[in-house]
Amino acid sequence: MIWYKEFYAGESIGYKKEKVKWKILHNAGQLDIYVIALSSNPHNLLDIISSIELMQKAYPRQDMMVVGIDKGYDNAVGLAGRIIMDVFQKTGNLNIREYFLEQQKNIRRRSIWKSFC
């Protein structure tokens, strides 16, 4: 599972976003938390997945890039809409996957340069 460095978190998550991320990575049960990830199907934009579903050992998590988390399905749908609108406003298109992958590359490059300075 790959986490977008500056992932979105809903208002209900707020300042606890790193704690929630840690719990998801360590399979700690969280009933009403949903993960928003880049879609596994190229014809879709985003997937909204229950954190309970992610606890299954057989769930394909290797190539999944998480771009947001929220509490409650309705809130997660709203956050997914906000993510899509943000990308559209910044790029003028709906190439969500390309946008986040490029942003992640740029963040890594900046981190590498900071470590050399």
Image (cartoon, rainbow, N blue to C red):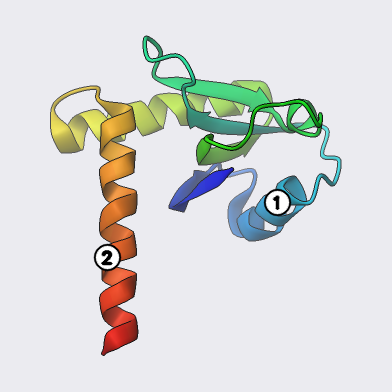
For label 1, the residue is 20
Q: Is residue 23 left or right of residue 87?
A: right
Q: Residue 85, percent across and down?
A: 30, 28
Extreme-bottom residue of the structure: 117
Q: Residue 30, percent across and down?
A: 82, 39
Q: Amino acid at mark 2?
A: Arg
The quarter of the picture where the N terminus appears is top right
Task: Tell which circle, 1 or 2, labels the residue nearer the N-terminal end.
Answer: 1
Compute the Cα span from label 1 to label 2.
26 Å
- SS type, badge 2: helix
Which residue is found at the position 63% from the left and 59% from the top?
18
Q: Amino acid at mark 1?
A: Val
Which residue is found at the position 54% from the left and 34% from the top?
64
Q: Quadrant of residue 29?
A: top right
Q: Closest to the observer: 101 or 51?
A: 101
Q: Quadrant of residue 36?
A: top right
Which residue is found at the position 73% from the left and 31% from the top?
54
Label 1 Cα neighbours within 10 Å, binned few <14 / some 14-19 / many ≥20? some
Q: How many marks?
A: 2
Extreme-left residue of the structure: 92
- SS type, badge 1: helix
Q: Closest to the observer: 14 or 94?
A: 94
For label 2, the residue is 109
The quarter of the picture where the C terminus appears is bottom left
Q: Is residue 29 left or right of residue 87?
A: right
